[in-house]
Amino acid sequence: MVISSNPEPNNEAFQSLIENTRLTLDIESKKDQEKYLGLSGNKLENVVAEVMSDKARNTPFENSIELISGQKFPDIIANKFYGVEVKTTKKNHWTTTGNSVLESSRIDGIERIFILFGKLVDPVEFICRPYEDCLSEIVVTHYPRYLINMKLQKENTIFHKLGVPYDELRNSPNPIKPIIDYYRKGRKPGEEVWWLDQEEPKSTGLIIQLWNNLPPDKKRDYKLKAMILFPEVFSDRKNKFNRVAVWLVNSEGIVCPYIRDVFSAGGQGIIEWEGKQYDKIPKIIVELSNCISELKAQLIEIDDRLLEFYWETQVENKFDNWIGQVIKNSQRIKSINLAKYLIEKFGNYHV
């Protein structure tokens, strides 16, 4: 195949080519609608490539149209610079799930991509628009993917919401981070994003475990880590265990259907301090007092960036910051001077 020597032909010329392709598809589908109603996505890619090749004659794109086989993005390329991603639906709407946000399968050198969307129902219709103008949200299958809406207004694209242009996002070393930051801002209390930052450790197994089936030492480790990452568990808020439950599923692959009982079974207890007994202490505070050395060890091991992610604040001294949050979330406790107690037990805390 002869490839054009012009590596970056005029954008208007390519837009003219794909518009002519779309018009031809509209005309041909009206002549033989049954043929187009029976097309699958792969079959339509072949038809689009054939029409584009025909319409490229006597243009800068002559002999440059290539249909790409396999799981590559986009489906069709022209002059090693432009691309067309072919999407279809058998339903009467203009939306579908798009490609990966990470674009790891993107063909090298392809800088401008358009979506050609075929609505293969009666009546068959086609729309073609710039790729980035049709991406409304992020959805997750086994990885984050764009949601395509061919009728989307440009001011409603995901990139407009993020405040980051498409080309800047796709060329970023970590395109997931601004997406996570955006969706975290819109969370309701107790909610967490499903797909976490690339720096956040993920569950790598294919098996979902039940809390009941974990060995005791694993249960204890997870409880201690949850006390650190989610200091709201020390509060009296009704939703105080919501983020813990999401974290266990999302990051650890563990389902705990009775998360509240894990932390509050037994209700209240006693703390002995300075020769006195303090009763009616919430069980979770009693447990904290019984595992101070283990909590210290956990805090030392946890990276500050992970703490900042879950605490949503800058970490200056992880011990000081954590103890301060425990105290803040336990202000209802009046039977003991908890601030003084924790400062004494942990040490190196400055009010």
Image: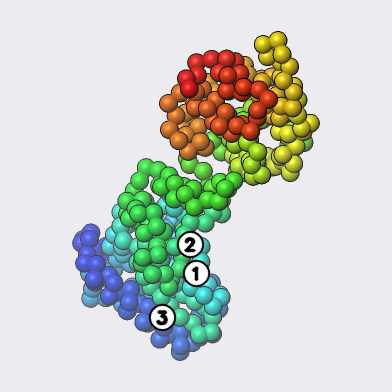
Identity of the amino acid at label 1? Answer: Thr
Q: Which residue is mark 3?
A: 25
Specify whether 304 is left or right of 340. Answer: left
Looking at the image, do the residues carrying marks 2 and 1 touch, with CB atoms under 8 Å apart? Answer: yes
* Residue situated furthest front in the rendering: 334
Q: Label 2 is placed on what type of residue?
A: Leu
Image quarter of residue 48: bottom left
Question: According to the image, label 2 marks what residue?
Answer: 147
Q: Mark 3: which amino acid?
A: Leu
Residue 341 occupies quadrant: top right
Q: Is residue 277 above or below residue 168?
A: above
Taking 70 as reference, is 311 above or below it?
above
Image location of residue 178, percent across then percent down: 41, 47
Secondary structure, mark 2, is strand
Q: How many marks?
A: 3
Q: Closer to the N terminus: mark 2 or mark 1?
A: 1
Q: Earlier along the polypeptide chain: callout 3 or callout 2?
A: 3
> In front here: 75 or 284?
284
Q: Residues within 10 Å of mark 1 (few under 14, many from 20)?
A: many
Badge 3 density bin: few <14, some 14–19, many ≥20, Cα 10 Å: many
- Determine which residue is flagged by label 1: 95
Cβ–Cβ under 8 Å for marks 3 and 2:
no
Residue at the spot x=44%, y=56% of the render?
Answer: 72
